[in-house]
């Protein structure tokens, strides 16, 4: 059965937090789920979506569009519901929203140690690209 997918609503918070805590091993305060959700809600771009089977929240996907590229983040499916097309449906749904924003290309990052997810994205048409990812947490003193 395919899930219903809609925009995140505040009543989803506890289930999203539980899924992300189970799924993503990030330890930094900026990755704390309540914080991530609050920042995204404050941004109000309507690119955080949730998948339900009946009343059960079974997946999430978050997008971003910065005027140059679209990005995918926090694509996650409840372990009990994987390999039933929910991840694919979430990404396809978000791709539609990103296209509607005008994003000409969509990128994502796979963290080191999580390479087993690459076949999933390849099945959806994504390709590993020969770029080196860099990042920085800006400091007031910079
Ligand atoms: C990655 C993830 C979202 C996939 O969700 P899912 O609902 O199981 O994926 P789907 O059932 O839609 O899979 C679609 C296709 O992707 C491929 N695929 C999915 N999972 C795969 C796996 N573990 N190994 C190989 N191929 C896989 C298959 O081709 C699959 O089609 P098929 O089942 O008909 O063969 C899910 O495994 C997950 O939540 N992982 C943990 C969180 C995570 O790492 N997210 C990515 C962050 S970058």
Image: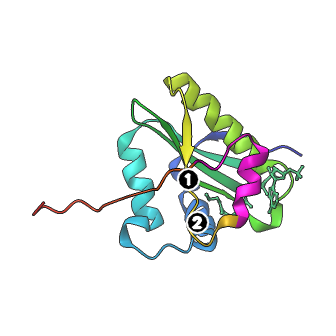
Farthest residue to the left: give it. 141
Q: Does dot 2 land on a helix, a strand or a loop?
A: helix
Residue at left 50%, top 23%?
102
130 left or right of 92 in image: left
Colour mode of the rendering: rainbow
Taking depth in this image into account, of 85 and 117 the one nearest to the observer is 117
Image spot of residue 32 (x, y percent): 43, 68
What percent of the width, then of the height, locates residue 104?
Answer: 53, 26
- Seen at 71% across and 61% down, the residue is 117
Query: Which residue is nearer to you in this view: 141 or 25?
Result: 141
Task: Name the mark nearer the viewer: 1 or 2.
Answer: 2
Tag on residue 134?
Answer: none
- Please, what secondary structure does the residue beneath circle 1 have? helix
Q: Quadrant of residue 91?
A: top right
Which x, y percent locates residue 36? 43, 58
- Camera-side residue of 69 and 21: 69
Residue 52 visible, this orientation: no
Q: CA distance from mark 1 to mark 2?
A: 16 Å
How many numbered marks have been drawn onto this rendered protein structure? 2
Q: Crowding near pointer 2: few (<14 within 10 Å), some, many (20+)?
A: many
Q: Residue at x 76, y 45 (%)?
A: 88
Q: Is residue 75 above or below residue 116?
A: above
- Asked if the magenta segment contains residue 122, the reply would be yes
- 32 part of magenta stretch: no
Q: Nearer the viewer, residue 3 or 138?
A: 138
Left or right: 52 as drawn, with respect to 20: right
Can the viewer see residue 32?
A: yes
Q: Earlier in the sequence, mark 1 or mark 2?
A: 1
Residue picked out by circle 2: 20
130 in relation to 101, above or below: below
Residue at the spot of label 1: 11
């Amino acid at each position: 059965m395919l899930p219903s997918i809609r925009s995140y609503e505040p009543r989803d918070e506890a289930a999203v937090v539980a899924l992300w805590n189970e799924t993503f091993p990030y330890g930094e305060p900026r990755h704390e789920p309540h914080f991530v959700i609050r920042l995204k809600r404050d941004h109000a771009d309507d690119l955080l979506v949730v998948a339900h089977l009946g009343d059960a929240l079974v997946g999430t996907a978050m997008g971003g569009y910065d005027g140059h590229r679209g990005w995918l983040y926090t694509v996650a499916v409840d372990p009990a519901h994987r390999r039933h097309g929910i991840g694919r449906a979430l990404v396809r749904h978000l791709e539609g929203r990103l296209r509607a924003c005008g994003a000409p290309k969509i990128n994502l990052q796979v963290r080191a140690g999580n390479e087993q997810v690459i076949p999933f994205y390849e099945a959806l048409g994504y390709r590993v690209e020969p770029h080196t990812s860099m990042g920085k947490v800006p400091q007031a003193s910079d």
